[in-house]
Amino acid sequence: MSCSRNCVRRRRGSLNCKKGPPRNPSQPRRRHQRPLTRKKETGMPRSNARRNLFFVLFSAFITFFGEIRDASAQEVRLKDLVQIRGVRSNQIHGLGLVMGLNGSGDSKKSLATNRAAANLLSRLGMQMKEDEVVAGTMAVVMVTGELPPFSRNGDRIDVKVSTVGDAKSLAGGNLMMAPLRAADSQIYAVAQGAILIGRASGSGAQVQTVAMIPDGGVVERETRTDFTRDGIMTLTMKDPDFTTVQRVCDLINSHFRGFYAEATDPSAVSLRIPASYADKIVEFVAELEALKVVADRAAVVVLNERTGTVVMGGDVMVSPVSISHGDLSISVGNAKAKDAGAPQHIVEVQGTTVASLIKSLNAMGVKPEDLVSILHSLKTAGALKADLRVM
């Protein structure tokens, strides 16, 4: 028996028709159901909208990441800004005798060398008078070194030797055992070894009367390093600054979640060690040194009048000013250059920083001595917003 028109085929499952219940004559006939169709969208296609949204988010991410990178580029580790009070090196020194020189040692006129040689040989069991010492084969030297903090017995350090008498060269010599003392007159190290002549100086000639002995010193007495007292340590700023020292305190308190750091002056921070780190001082200091802070600095321009070298920060400002120097007429910012005589060169600087000014002057071929003179004049006129330091 065939299916009537009021039969609805199932779109899912079996396609076999089944008779439904008898139709009520009072109800309208039901037509076959048709699948609903989505109207055609008249707006922007979904693929284009998603693509535009992706580009917007990507651009925002790049901008945000660039800002973070610019900000972090100015951040400095606390390890490079501060040092812990009590953690320091100690200077040591002593007199020594260099032997084995090929005629370049102290002459007969050096009584100290003759006496030192006679005493050394006497301690070794050989009796010799001072006038019997062969001239030119020995030289009295001053031996200096630096004892690092936390030095232990057996650690080796570099030492430097310098002639005391009239020796011409220490090349080829050998330093005999020399005790090295600190300011308390206690012996902390002993130096001995072959002489190594240093590098050439700026003029190209080697300095023969000063030499190094790498690992020539051996630590014999340990130094005591106390950097905490009653759970408090002090951080000293390498470059004292009010703004930077306050930023350091805020950073430490924020990182360790408490009030532990307090600035006593622009150069020192009193730091209370948290209770959780009382038995982990090394871990605490390591975590402390790894923190990064934006260091503030004063605007400084450093000049070397001999070489014409200028060192400054890129943000050193110059007020709008007009300068006339020799045959140059310079206008900085919105200032108008005024004729002083008949200038042959007119320089207009659009920026208001020292960097832009120097760039424009270098492009004009200004000599180093003229550059130094111009910066001096800017400072005198009050247009240079920085400290001017001359080397």
Image (spheres, rainbow, N blue to C red):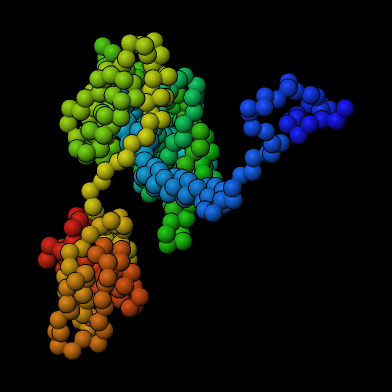
Q: Residue furthest right?
A: 1
Q: Residue furthest bottom?
A: 342
Residue 345 percent across, percent down from the top left: 26, 84
Q: Quadrant of residue 318?
A: bottom left
Quadrant of image for the C terminus: bottom left
Residue 157 percent across, percent down from the top left: 46, 31
Quadrant of image for the N terminus: top right
Q: Quadrant of residue 83?
A: top left
Position of residue 31 relative to residue 379, above or below, is above
Q: Residue furthest left?
A: 381
Residue 34 or residue 218, whichever sits in front: 34
State the residue at coordinates (26%, 78%): 347
Residue 282 or residue 184, whichever sits in front: 282
Residue 333: in sight, yes or no? yes
State the residue at coordinates (61%, 44%): 38
Q: Is residue 44 left or right of residue 280?
A: right
State the residue at coordinates (22%, 33%): 246
Residue 101: in sight, yes or no? no
Q: Is residue 232 left or right of residue 56?
A: left
Position of residue 162 relative to residue 220, above or below, is below
Residue 221 percent across, percent down from the top left: 41, 19
Residue 51 or residue 133, whichever sits in front: 51
State the residue at coordinates (30%, 73%): 361
Q: How many marks?
A: 0
Q: Residue furthest front?
A: 25
Position of residue 301 relative to residue 148, above or below, is below
Residue 193 percent across, percent down from the top left: 52, 35
Position of residue 387 relative to residue 327, above or below, is above
Q: Quadrant of residue 331?
A: bottom left
Residue 107 or residue 44, whichever sits in front: 44
